[in-house]
Image: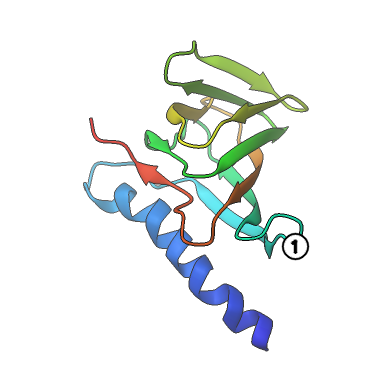
Amino acid sequence: MNALRFFAAPLAALTLSISAPAFAHDTAPPSEKVTILQDQMLKNAPGKKALMIEVDYEPGQSSIAHKHQGTAMAYVLSGEIVSQVKGEKAITYKAGEFWYEPAGSEHLVSKNASATQPAKLLVFMVLAPEEKVLIPLEN
C-alpha cells in the first residue's frame, strides 16, 4: 500500500503534464497514452532516478513539441515512429530501432508514421526527482 501512495502523486503529475496541453483547444486530437512502467531512485547515481515509460500512439497521432530535462532513450516496440530533435533531420524508426536524446534536447516531432496502424514506444529516462519529464515548447 505504501508503494501505491509513493507512485500515485508522480503518476498523476506526469499524466496531467502530458495530457493537459492536448485539452487546451477543443480541436486538438486526444493525447497519446502514456503509462509509467517503473519509477526508481538510482543507488549508484545519487540524486537521480530512472523512469521506464510506454507511449501508445493511435494511427496518425502525435505528441506536442517538447523537451525533457532528463536524458531519454527510446525503443520502438511496434509500428513506426517519426522523431526529430532540433538541429537534426526527421527520422522514421521501425519496430526494433532506437535513439538517444541528451538532456535538454528539443523534441520537435514525435508521431506515429502511419495513418492506419497504431505504434508503441518504450522510453527510458534518467533525471532528478524534481526535473520534469516533459516541458511543452512555445511556438
What's the residue at 31%, 36% (across, down)?
137
Residue lying at the far bottom of the rendered structure: 1
Instruction: Relative to 86, say whether 31 is above or below.
Output: below
Can residue 132 be seen at all in this image of the molecule? Answer: yes
Question: Residue 14 location in percent, x, y?
Answer: 47, 60
Name the one closer to the observer, 78 or 98: 98
Callout 1 secondary element: loop
From the viewer's side, name the closer residue of 114 and 99: 99
Foreground of the two, 12 or 126: 126
Label 1 neighbourhood size at 10 Å, few (<14), some (14-19), many (20+)? Answer: few
Rendered location of residue 108, percent (x, y): 40, 26
Give me the residue at 66% from left, 87% from top.
2
Q: Quadrant of the C terminus?
A: top left
Q: Is residue 97 left or right of residue 107?
A: right
Which residue type carries mark 1?
A: Lys
The residue under label 1 is: 43
Q: Position of residue 19 (x, y in %)?
A: 39, 54
- Residue 136 position in % (x across, y down): 34, 42
**Seen in the image, is 56 located left or right of residue 31?**
right
Q: Is residue 113 visible?
A: no
Q: Quadrant of residue 77?
A: top right
Above/below status of 58 relative to 17: above
Residue drawn at point x = 60 percent, y = 60 percent: 47
